Image (spheres, rainbow, N blue to C red):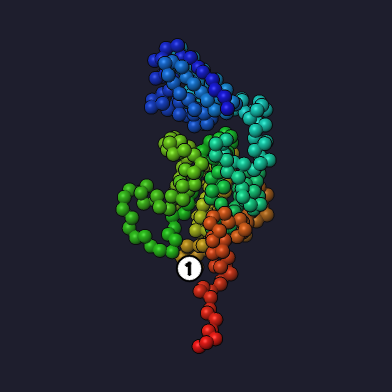
Amino acid sequence: MSESTLTLGDPQLALQLFGPQDTNLRRVRNQLGVAITHRNGQIRIAGPSDSVRIATEILEQLRDKVMHQGTVGPDEVADIMQSLISSRTSSGGERNEISKHEMKEVAIGNAGRRVKPRTTGQAQYIEAIRSHDMTFCIGPAGCGKTYLAVATAVEAYRARQVRKIVLVRPAVEAGESLGYLPGDLSEKLNPYLRPLLDAINEMVDFDQVKFLMEQDIIEVIPLAYMRGRTLNSAFVILDEAQNATVAQMKMFLTRMGEGSKVVVSGDISQVDLPAGVTSGLRDAAQRLHGIEGIAMVRLHESDIVRHPLVQKIVAAYEGNRSYPPKRAPDSDR
Protein backbone atom coordinates (compact mmCIF):
# COMPACT_ATOMS: atom_id res chain seq x y z
CA MET A 1 0.00 0.00 0.00
CA SER A 2 1.17 3.54 -0.72
CA GLU A 3 -0.18 7.05 -0.98
CA SER A 4 0.52 10.31 -2.76
CA THR A 5 -0.61 13.93 -2.46
CA LEU A 6 -1.61 16.28 -5.25
CA THR A 7 -1.81 20.05 -4.64
CA LEU A 8 -4.46 22.04 -6.48
CA GLY A 9 -3.27 25.52 -5.51
CA ASP A 10 -6.80 26.88 -5.65
CA PRO A 11 -9.23 24.74 -3.64
CA GLN A 12 -12.04 25.88 -5.97
CA LEU A 13 -10.46 23.84 -8.77
CA ALA A 14 -11.74 20.71 -7.05
CA LEU A 15 -15.33 21.46 -8.11
CA GLN A 16 -14.44 21.36 -11.79
CA LEU A 17 -11.85 18.62 -11.41
CA PHE A 18 -14.17 16.20 -9.62
CA GLY A 19 -17.10 16.86 -11.98
CA PRO A 20 -20.85 16.97 -11.25
CA GLN A 21 -21.60 14.99 -8.07
CA ASP A 22 -17.93 13.88 -8.04
CA THR A 23 -18.44 11.83 -11.21
CA ASN A 24 -14.80 12.10 -12.35
CA LEU A 25 -13.50 11.31 -8.88
CA ARG A 26 -15.67 8.21 -8.54
CA ARG A 27 -14.69 7.06 -12.02
CA VAL A 28 -10.98 7.08 -11.16
CA ARG A 29 -11.59 5.52 -7.76
CA ASN A 30 -13.77 2.70 -9.08
CA GLN A 31 -11.54 1.91 -12.05
CA LEU A 32 -8.31 1.69 -10.06
CA GLY A 33 -9.52 0.65 -6.62
CA VAL A 34 -7.96 3.60 -4.76
CA ALA A 35 -9.22 5.87 -1.99
CA ILE A 36 -9.28 9.59 -2.85
CA THR A 37 -9.94 12.37 -0.34
CA HIS A 38 -9.77 16.16 -0.62
CA ARG A 39 -9.14 18.79 2.00
CA ASN A 40 -8.01 22.42 1.68
CA GLY A 41 -6.69 22.04 -1.85
CA GLN A 42 -4.83 18.80 -1.08
CA ILE A 43 -5.91 15.57 -2.79
CA ARG A 44 -4.72 12.39 -1.09
CA ILE A 45 -4.66 9.11 -3.07
CA ALA A 46 -4.12 5.82 -1.21
CA GLY A 47 -4.11 2.18 -2.30
CA PRO A 48 -1.93 -0.35 -4.15
CA SER A 49 1.29 1.37 -5.27
CA ASP A 50 0.83 0.86 -9.00
CA SER A 51 -2.80 2.03 -8.91
CA VAL A 52 -1.83 5.10 -6.86
CA ARG A 53 0.78 6.10 -9.46
CA ILE A 54 -1.72 5.79 -12.33
CA ALA A 55 -4.47 7.64 -10.42
CA THR A 56 -2.04 10.47 -9.55
CA GLU A 57 -1.00 10.86 -13.18
CA ILE A 58 -4.66 10.92 -14.28
CA LEU A 59 -5.59 13.58 -11.71
CA GLU A 60 -2.51 15.66 -12.58
CA GLN A 61 -3.51 15.76 -16.26
CA LEU A 62 -7.12 16.54 -15.36
CA ARG A 63 -5.94 19.35 -13.06
CA ASP A 64 -3.81 20.85 -15.84
CA LYS A 65 -6.75 20.78 -18.26
CA VAL A 66 -9.03 22.45 -15.74
CA MET A 67 -6.43 25.15 -15.06
CA HIS A 68 -6.06 25.91 -18.79
CA GLN A 69 -9.64 25.57 -20.04
CA GLY A 70 -11.74 25.95 -16.89
CA THR A 71 -13.51 22.60 -17.18
CA VAL A 72 -13.03 19.02 -18.36
CA GLY A 73 -15.62 16.91 -20.17
CA PRO A 74 -16.44 13.22 -19.67
CA ASP A 75 -14.89 12.29 -23.04
CA GLU A 76 -11.62 13.97 -22.06
CA VAL A 77 -11.65 12.13 -18.74
CA ALA A 78 -12.21 8.81 -20.53
CA ASP A 79 -9.42 9.49 -23.05
CA ILE A 80 -6.88 10.42 -20.37
CA MET A 81 -7.76 7.39 -18.25
CA GLN A 82 -7.63 4.96 -21.16
CA SER A 83 -4.32 6.36 -22.43
CA LEU A 84 -2.54 6.23 -19.08
CA ILE A 85 -3.98 2.89 -17.99
CA SER A 86 -3.16 1.21 -21.32
CA SER A 87 0.40 2.51 -21.46
CA ARG A 88 1.03 1.62 -17.83
CA THR A 89 -0.31 -1.96 -18.04
CA SER A 90 1.47 -2.69 -21.36
CA SER A 91 4.86 -1.58 -20.02
CA GLY A 92 5.53 -4.96 -18.38
CA GLY A 93 6.06 -3.48 -14.95
CA GLU A 94 4.78 -4.28 -11.49
CA ARG A 95 1.17 -4.90 -12.52
CA ASN A 96 2.11 -7.64 -14.99
CA GLU A 97 4.18 -9.39 -12.35
CA ILE A 98 1.24 -9.26 -9.95
CA SER A 99 -1.06 -10.73 -12.60
CA LYS A 100 1.29 -13.67 -13.17
CA HIS A 101 1.44 -14.34 -9.46
CA GLU A 102 -2.35 -14.25 -9.18
CA MET A 103 -2.66 -16.66 -12.11
CA LYS A 104 -0.50 -19.20 -10.27
CA GLU A 105 -2.70 -18.84 -7.19
CA VAL A 106 -5.87 -18.99 -9.29
CA ALA A 107 -7.09 -16.06 -7.19
CA ILE A 108 -9.74 -13.62 -8.33
CA GLY A 109 -10.58 -10.08 -7.33
CA ASN A 110 -8.68 -7.23 -5.73
CA ALA A 111 -6.40 -7.32 -2.72
CA GLY A 112 -9.29 -6.75 -0.33
CA ARG A 113 -11.65 -9.41 -1.70
CA ARG A 114 -9.96 -12.48 -3.10
CA VAL A 115 -12.04 -15.38 -4.34
CA LYS A 116 -10.27 -18.71 -4.65
CA PRO A 117 -11.53 -22.03 -5.97
CA ARG A 118 -12.18 -24.57 -3.26
CA THR A 119 -12.13 -27.69 -5.44
CA THR A 120 -10.15 -28.96 -8.41
CA GLY A 121 -13.24 -28.68 -10.58
CA GLN A 122 -13.69 -25.03 -9.68
CA ALA A 123 -10.03 -24.33 -10.51
CA GLN A 124 -10.48 -25.97 -13.92
CA TYR A 125 -13.61 -23.89 -14.48
CA ILE A 126 -11.75 -20.64 -13.78
CA GLU A 127 -8.84 -21.57 -16.03
CA ALA A 128 -11.25 -22.55 -18.81
CA ILE A 129 -12.89 -19.12 -18.64
CA ARG A 130 -9.53 -17.36 -18.68
CA SER A 131 -8.21 -19.33 -21.65
CA HIS A 132 -11.33 -19.55 -23.84
CA ASP A 133 -13.63 -16.98 -25.42
CA MET A 134 -16.67 -19.14 -24.69
CA THR A 135 -17.16 -21.51 -21.76
CA PHE A 136 -20.05 -23.81 -20.90
CA CYS A 137 -20.36 -25.09 -17.34
CA ILE A 138 -22.87 -27.73 -16.27
CA GLY A 139 -23.12 -28.70 -12.64
CA PRO A 140 -25.42 -29.17 -9.66
CA ALA A 141 -26.68 -26.46 -7.32
CA GLY A 142 -24.10 -25.00 -4.98
CA CYS A 143 -20.92 -25.68 -6.96
CA GLY A 144 -20.14 -22.00 -7.65
CA LYS A 145 -21.12 -21.80 -11.32
CA THR A 146 -22.59 -18.29 -11.10
CA TYR A 147 -20.36 -16.95 -8.34
CA LEU A 148 -17.07 -17.86 -10.04
CA ALA A 149 -18.30 -16.60 -13.43
CA VAL A 150 -19.19 -13.22 -11.90
CA ALA A 151 -15.85 -13.13 -10.06
CA THR A 152 -13.88 -13.71 -13.28
CA ALA A 153 -16.00 -11.04 -15.00
CA VAL A 154 -15.07 -8.53 -12.28
CA GLU A 155 -11.43 -9.59 -12.61
CA ALA A 156 -11.50 -9.10 -16.40
CA TYR A 157 -13.09 -5.66 -16.06
CA ARG A 158 -10.57 -4.50 -13.45
CA ALA A 159 -7.74 -5.74 -15.68
CA ARG A 160 -9.21 -3.66 -18.55
CA GLN A 161 -9.73 -6.78 -20.66
CA VAL A 162 -13.39 -5.85 -21.22
CA ARG A 163 -15.35 -2.61 -21.09
CA LYS A 164 -18.56 -3.90 -19.59
CA ILE A 165 -20.21 -6.83 -17.81
CA VAL A 166 -23.57 -8.20 -18.96
CA LEU A 167 -25.43 -10.63 -16.69
CA VAL A 168 -28.31 -12.49 -18.35
CA ARG A 169 -30.96 -14.88 -17.04
CA PRO A 170 -34.11 -16.46 -18.52
CA ALA A 171 -37.30 -15.21 -16.86
CA VAL A 172 -38.70 -18.66 -16.19
CA GLU A 173 -40.59 -19.54 -13.02
CA ALA A 174 -39.22 -22.48 -11.02
CA GLY A 175 -42.19 -24.83 -11.10
CA GLU A 176 -44.81 -22.46 -9.72
CA SER A 177 -46.82 -19.60 -11.15
CA LEU A 178 -46.24 -16.26 -9.48
CA GLY A 179 -49.24 -14.75 -11.21
CA TYR A 180 -49.49 -11.05 -11.91
CA LEU A 181 -46.61 -9.13 -10.36
CA PRO A 182 -47.33 -5.49 -9.48
CA GLY A 183 -44.98 -2.61 -10.23
CA ASP A 184 -43.04 -1.33 -13.24
CA LEU A 185 -40.99 -3.53 -15.59
CA SER A 186 -37.88 -3.36 -13.40
CA GLU A 187 -39.83 -4.50 -10.33
CA LYS A 188 -41.44 -7.35 -12.26
CA LEU A 189 -38.08 -8.67 -13.46
CA ASN A 190 -36.20 -8.18 -10.18
CA PRO A 191 -37.13 -11.62 -8.69
CA TYR A 192 -35.61 -13.38 -11.72
CA LEU A 193 -32.41 -11.30 -11.79
CA ARG A 194 -31.86 -11.07 -8.01
CA PRO A 195 -29.39 -14.02 -7.80
CA LEU A 196 -27.05 -12.31 -10.27
CA LEU A 197 -27.21 -9.03 -8.34
CA ASP A 198 -26.52 -10.88 -5.10
CA ALA A 199 -23.39 -12.45 -6.60
CA ILE A 200 -21.92 -9.19 -7.87
CA ASN A 201 -22.79 -7.31 -4.67
CA GLU A 202 -20.61 -9.78 -2.75
CA MET A 203 -17.58 -8.74 -4.81
CA VAL A 204 -18.17 -5.06 -5.51
CA ASP A 205 -19.29 -2.41 -3.02
CA PHE A 206 -22.95 -1.45 -3.32
CA ASP A 207 -22.15 2.18 -4.22
CA GLN A 208 -19.76 1.03 -6.94
CA VAL A 209 -22.32 -1.39 -8.36
CA LYS A 210 -24.92 1.38 -8.44
CA PHE A 211 -22.49 3.75 -10.17
CA LEU A 212 -21.37 1.14 -12.72
CA MET A 213 -25.01 0.28 -13.51
CA GLU A 214 -25.82 3.97 -13.95
CA GLN A 215 -22.89 4.23 -16.39
CA ASP A 216 -24.17 1.14 -18.25
CA ILE A 217 -20.92 -0.69 -17.44
CA ILE A 218 -22.84 -3.42 -15.61
CA GLU A 219 -26.10 -4.66 -17.14
CA VAL A 220 -28.43 -7.22 -15.57
CA ILE A 221 -31.10 -8.16 -18.09
CA PRO A 222 -33.53 -10.98 -18.98
CA LEU A 223 -32.57 -13.25 -21.88
CA ALA A 224 -35.43 -12.05 -24.09
CA TYR A 225 -33.89 -8.56 -24.18
CA MET A 226 -30.72 -9.81 -25.89
CA ARG A 227 -32.29 -10.11 -29.33
CA GLY A 228 -30.85 -7.78 -31.95
CA ARG A 229 -27.79 -6.77 -29.91
CA THR A 230 -24.08 -7.16 -30.65
CA LEU A 231 -21.84 -7.03 -27.58
CA ASN A 232 -18.23 -5.99 -28.20
CA SER A 233 -15.52 -5.97 -25.50
CA ALA A 234 -17.99 -7.39 -22.99
CA PHE A 235 -18.00 -10.22 -20.47
CA VAL A 236 -21.39 -11.85 -20.89
CA ILE A 237 -22.78 -14.46 -18.47
CA LEU A 238 -25.92 -16.51 -19.11
CA ASP A 239 -27.04 -17.97 -15.78
CA GLU A 240 -29.65 -20.74 -15.33
CA ALA A 241 -29.08 -21.57 -19.00
CA GLN A 242 -30.95 -24.87 -18.69
CA ASN A 243 -34.13 -22.77 -18.88
CA ALA A 244 -33.27 -21.30 -22.28
CA THR A 245 -34.89 -22.93 -25.29
CA VAL A 246 -32.78 -24.08 -28.25
CA ALA A 247 -33.84 -20.99 -30.26
CA GLN A 248 -33.04 -18.67 -27.34
CA MET A 249 -29.62 -20.27 -26.86
CA LYS A 250 -28.75 -19.77 -30.52
CA MET A 251 -29.93 -16.17 -30.32
CA PHE A 252 -27.84 -15.55 -27.20
CA LEU A 253 -24.62 -17.14 -28.47
CA THR A 254 -24.75 -15.18 -31.71
CA ARG A 255 -24.79 -11.85 -29.81
CA MET A 256 -21.05 -12.28 -29.14
CA GLY A 257 -18.95 -9.48 -30.62
CA GLU A 258 -15.25 -8.65 -30.98
CA GLY A 259 -13.15 -8.87 -27.83
CA SER A 260 -15.91 -10.49 -25.77
CA LYS A 261 -16.05 -13.48 -23.45
CA VAL A 262 -19.15 -15.58 -22.91
CA VAL A 263 -19.88 -17.93 -20.00
CA VAL A 264 -22.97 -20.15 -20.07
CA SER A 265 -23.83 -22.03 -16.87
CA GLY A 266 -26.69 -24.17 -15.64
CA ASP A 267 -27.92 -27.37 -14.06
CA ILE A 268 -29.59 -29.74 -16.53
CA SER A 269 -31.21 -31.62 -13.64
CA GLN A 270 -33.34 -28.55 -12.80
CA VAL A 271 -35.07 -27.63 -16.05
CA ASP A 272 -38.23 -25.53 -15.57
CA LEU A 273 -39.29 -25.45 -19.23
CA PRO A 274 -42.69 -26.88 -20.24
CA ALA A 275 -42.85 -30.62 -20.87
CA GLY A 276 -41.58 -31.55 -24.31
CA VAL A 277 -39.43 -28.41 -24.74
CA THR A 278 -35.70 -29.18 -25.19
CA SER A 279 -33.25 -27.36 -22.95
CA GLY A 280 -30.98 -25.09 -24.96
CA LEU A 281 -28.10 -25.84 -22.58
CA ARG A 282 -28.34 -29.59 -23.08
CA ASP A 283 -28.64 -29.11 -26.86
CA ALA A 284 -25.69 -26.70 -27.07
CA ALA A 285 -23.43 -28.95 -24.97
CA GLN A 286 -23.97 -31.73 -27.52
CA ARG A 287 -24.04 -29.58 -30.66
CA LEU A 288 -20.96 -27.44 -29.90
CA HIS A 289 -18.77 -30.08 -28.26
CA GLY A 290 -15.31 -30.21 -29.84
CA ILE A 291 -15.39 -26.75 -31.46
CA GLU A 292 -12.04 -25.00 -31.01
CA GLY A 293 -12.27 -21.99 -28.72
CA ILE A 294 -15.22 -23.36 -26.75
CA ALA A 295 -14.60 -25.01 -23.37
CA MET A 296 -16.99 -27.53 -21.84
CA VAL A 297 -16.68 -27.91 -18.05
CA ARG A 298 -18.62 -30.38 -15.94
CA LEU A 299 -18.82 -29.90 -12.17
CA HIS A 300 -20.00 -32.64 -9.82
CA GLU A 301 -21.32 -33.25 -6.32
CA SER A 302 -17.76 -33.08 -4.98
CA ASP A 303 -17.57 -29.43 -6.16
CA ILE A 304 -20.54 -28.29 -4.07
CA VAL A 305 -19.39 -25.69 -1.55
CA ARG A 306 -22.64 -24.70 0.18
CA HIS A 307 -23.83 -26.25 3.44
CA PRO A 308 -22.55 -29.87 3.76
CA LEU A 309 -26.15 -31.11 3.59
CA VAL A 310 -26.49 -29.80 0.01
CA GLN A 311 -24.09 -32.47 -1.29
CA LYS A 312 -26.17 -35.17 0.41
CA ILE A 313 -29.43 -33.69 -0.90
CA VAL A 314 -28.14 -33.59 -4.48
CA ALA A 315 -26.85 -37.15 -4.18
CA ALA A 316 -30.22 -38.30 -2.82
CA TYR A 317 -32.17 -36.77 -5.68
CA GLU A 318 -29.80 -37.91 -8.41
CA GLY A 319 -29.68 -41.41 -6.94
CA ASN A 320 -33.48 -41.55 -6.68
CA ARG A 321 -33.29 -42.58 -3.04
CA SER A 322 -36.63 -42.88 -1.27
CA TYR A 323 -37.25 -40.94 1.95
CA PRO A 324 -38.07 -41.69 4.64
CA PRO A 325 -36.40 -45.14 4.52
CA LYS A 326 -38.63 -48.11 5.14
CA ARG A 327 -39.00 -48.96 8.83
CA ALA A 328 -37.65 -52.30 9.92
CA PRO A 329 -40.32 -54.51 11.49
CA ASP A 330 -40.32 -54.53 15.28
CA SER A 331 -39.44 -57.94 16.72
CA ASP A 332 -41.85 -57.61 19.65
CA ARG A 333 -44.94 -57.00 17.51
Answer with left or right where residue 192 lies relative to residue 104: left
Residue 138 image position (x, y, % from top left)? 59, 57
| Residue 124 appearing in the image | yes
**What is the quadrant of residue 174 in the picture?**
bottom left
Count of picture labels: 1
- Seen from the viewer's position, the closer of residues 116 and 224 is 116
Residue drawn at (44%, 58%), measured in percent from left and top? 172
Residue 95 image position (x, y, % from top left)? 63, 30
**What is the quadrant of residue 206 in the picture?**
top left
Residue 301 image position (x, y, % from top left)? 60, 60
Image quarter where the N terminus lies is: top right
> Secondary structure beneath disc 1?
loop
Answer with left or right where residue 10 lies relative to residue 108: left
Residue drawn at (42%, 16%), measured in percent from left and top? 40
Label 1 crowd bin: few (<14), some (14–19), many (20+), radius 10 Å: few
Which amino acid does the dot numbered 1 rest on? Answer: Ala
> Height in image: 92 above or below 166?
above
User: Which residue is situated farthest in the front direction here?
Assistant: 332
Answer with left or right where residue 136 lies relative to residue 38: right
| Residue 314 appearing in the image | no
> Height in image: 41 above or below 96?
above
Answer with left or right where residue 183 lies relative to residue 63: left
Dot 1 corresponds to which residue?
Answer: 275
Residue 293 image position (x, y, % from top left)? 66, 47
Residue drawn at (56%, 64%), measured in percent from left and top? 312
- Seen from the viewer's position, the closer of residues 14 and 220 is 14
User: Which residue is situated farthest in the bottom direction here?
Assistant: 333
Residue drawn at (43%, 53%), measured in percent from left and top? 192
